[in-house]
Image: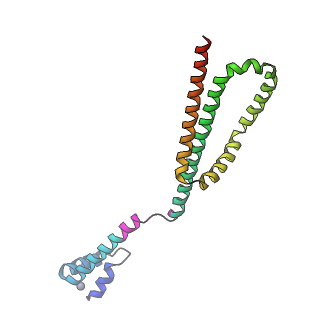
């Protein structure tokens, strides 16, 4: 039998009959040309298999983009959370500092304040909506601010607030001491 028949068998997709298989094996033993061809075929096949494993699944770029957008959104949410938290901490600190002194002054206004408080509670109930709006606003703002200021601005604001609170504390302590 000529090489060509065996060459065809080498790359046959369907399984060979036992007779064909045996004939091919015998021929491969005696024929260097077909042996080299078989080896080359196996090498190419292996190459194709590894390549298809390494190659990303279709839609990879879209998933990657979506993942990036997701990450950015998460970072934005975290920044928003930090801003809200520091604002809340600042407000609570101020309330604690001045609350005791202001309470007697505010006493007549307490019913109005309670009403306001219930309104605020109602707003807080819609906080998710507010948060969504804030996050969109923040995203727009953050987009326009150079990265240096995104870091420097909050830190300097926090530092200023800390200095402010500390000096307020000192002032009130000095006043106390003077009064005593
Ligand atoms: Zn041959």
Q: Residue 4 location, x and y as percent?
A: 30, 87
Q: Residue 75 location, x and y as percent?
A: 55, 48
Image quadrant where one finds the N terminus = bottom left
The residue range painted magenta reads: 48-60
Image quadrant where one finds the C terminus = top right
Q: Is residue 34 magenta?
A: no
Determine the residue positioned at 47% across, 63% down.
57
Quarter holding residue 39? bottom left
Q: Is 99 on the left or on the right of 155, as rendered? A: right
The total number of labels drawn is 0
Q: Nearer the viewer, residue 94 or 22?
A: 94
Q: Is 56 on the left or on the right of 82, as rendered? A: left
The majority secondary structure of the magenta stretch comes to: helix
Q: Residue 59 location, x and y as percent?
A: 52, 64
Determine the residue positioned at 63% across, 52% down.
141
Determine the residue positioned at 55% across, 49% down.
149
Q: Residue 143 location, x and y as percent?
A: 60, 55
Q: Residue furthest front?
A: 178
Q: Is 159 on the left or on the right of 94, as rendered? A: left
Q: Is 53 on the left or on the right of 61, as rendered? A: left
Q: Nearer the viewer, residue 119 or 14?
A: 119
Q: Residue furthest left?
A: 30
Quadrant for ligand 1 reads: bottom left
Q: Nearer the viewer, residue 29 or 88?
A: 88
Q: Residue furthest top?
A: 180
Q: Is residue 55 magenta?
A: yes
Q: Nearer the viewer, residue 66 or 41?
A: 66
Determine the residue positioned at 78% across, 32% down.
119
């Amino acid at each position: 039998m000529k090489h060509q028949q065996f060459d065809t068998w080498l790359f046959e997709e369907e399984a060979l009959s036992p007779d064909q298989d045996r004939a091919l094996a015998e021929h491969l033993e005696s024929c260097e040309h077909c042996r080299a061809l078989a080896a080359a075929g196996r090498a190419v096949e292996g190459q194709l298999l590894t390549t298809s494993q390494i190659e990303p699944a279709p839609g990879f770029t879209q998933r990657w983009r979506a993942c990036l957008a997701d990450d950015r959104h998460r970072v934005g949410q975290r920044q928003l959370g930090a801003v809200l938290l520091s604002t809340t901490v600042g407000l609570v600190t101020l309330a604690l500092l001045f609350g005791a002194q202001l309470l007697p002054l505010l006493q007549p206004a307490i019913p109005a304040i309670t009403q306001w408080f219930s309104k605020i509670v109602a707003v807080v109930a819609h906080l998710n909506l507010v948060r969504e709006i804030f996050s969109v606003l923040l995203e727009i703002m953050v987009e326009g601010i150079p990265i240096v200021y995104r870091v420097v601005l909050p830190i300097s604001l926090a530092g200023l607030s800390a200095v402010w609170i500390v000096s307020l504390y000192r002032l009130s302590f000095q006043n106390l001491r003077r009064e005593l």
